[in-house]
Amino acid sequence: MKVGTDGVLLGAWAAVQPQDRRMLDIGTGTGLIALMLAQRAPEAHVTGVDIDDVGQARENAAASPWSGRVAFAQCPVQEFETPEPFDLIVSNPPFFVDSLTCPDGGRTAARHAVHLPFGDLRDAVLRLLAPGGRFAVILPTAEAERFLAVCAGRLALVRRTDVRTTPRRPAKRALMEFVCADRPADRPADRSADCSAAVPEVSELVVGTGEHECYTPEYRALTRDFYLKF
């Protein structure tokens, strides 16, 4: 799968904090989101992992100004090992769960949750995320509700942006940011200290104005740096 709106949106929307030093892109594909993170976080090292060949991602990184801080591994994330956890994990994962698969095996792997079920993605994030780290993901709205159900009690939603293609169309995508919802065993059951009890920040983004190839100012502002510098 090549560069698309979903990847650009997630790479621009994911919250990058000054203290972030290690970032992971699950299902990196061509390396788009990994390179966007490297562009936005000059001090961070970014790793991209994908079950498919990462040769094109490596070529793209080598041709970028950030090649020294981006690395890729061809490996199922379920088997991916790292000596240190990550401050930020992002993913534009395969998402169709119950729909018919495509005869093209490569496209099926990229679009359907065949090799990376939502439960496996959740478990990988819980295993690889540093204490206090965040996980950002983009999904179609229906699949977003499925993912929220899978994450209940394990990953807590703290921020969500629903994305419309035009003002008159319903939301097509959900950008979501999570933190670990588990409390240490010795912490009292005080819901004021439980991040899963917090009300997430919710917003909406409209990509197009409804006129042909005319983007909204909000979308242009969100993605401006990527298009100018990449």
Image: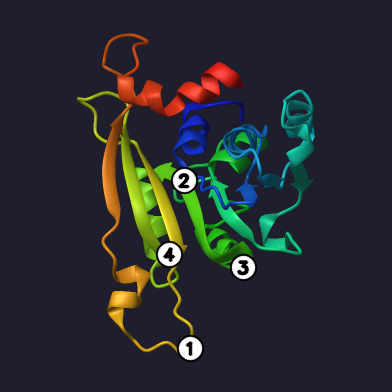
Q: Name the residue under label 4.
A: 150
- Mark 3 residue type: Arg
Q: Name the residue under label 1.
A: 185
Which numbered disc, 1 or 3, marks the residue that appears first in the sequence? Answer: 3
Quarter holding residue 80? bottom right
User: At 27% from the left edge and 17% from the top edge, which residue is drawn?
Assistant: 209
- Mark 4 residue type: Val
Q: Name the residue under label 2.
A: 15
Q: Residues within 10 Å of mark 4 (few under 14, many from 20)?
A: some
| Residue 128 can be seen in this image | yes
Residues under numbered marks 1 and 3 in contact, where contact means CB atoms less than 8 Å apart: no
User: At 71% from the left edge and 47% from the top edge, which residue is drawn?
Assistant: 51
Query: Between marks 4 and 2, how big is the CA–CA gap?
Result: 23 Å
Quarter of the picture holding the C terminus: top right
Q: Is residue 194 above or below residue 172?
A: below
| Residue 104 can be seen in this image | no
User: At 63% from the left edge and 53% from the top edge, which residue is drawn?
Assistant: 115
Q: Residues within 10 Å of mark 3 (few under 14, many from 20)?
A: few
The x and y percentages for residue 198 are 29, 66
The x and y percentages for residue 30 are 67, 32
> SS class of the residue under badge 2?
loop
Query: Between marks 2 and 1, how big is the CA–CA gap?
Result: 29 Å
- Mark 1 residue type: Ala
> SS class of the residue under badge 3?
helix
User: Front-most of 226 and 5?
Assistant: 226
Quarter of the picture holding the N terminus: top right
Which numbered disc, 4 or 2, marks the residue that appears first in the sequence? Answer: 2
Tag nearer the camera, 4 or 2: 2
Check residue 70 in the rendering and tell me which mark sits there, or answer none. Answer: none
Residues under numbered marks 4 and 2 in contact, where contact means CB atoms less than 8 Å apart: no
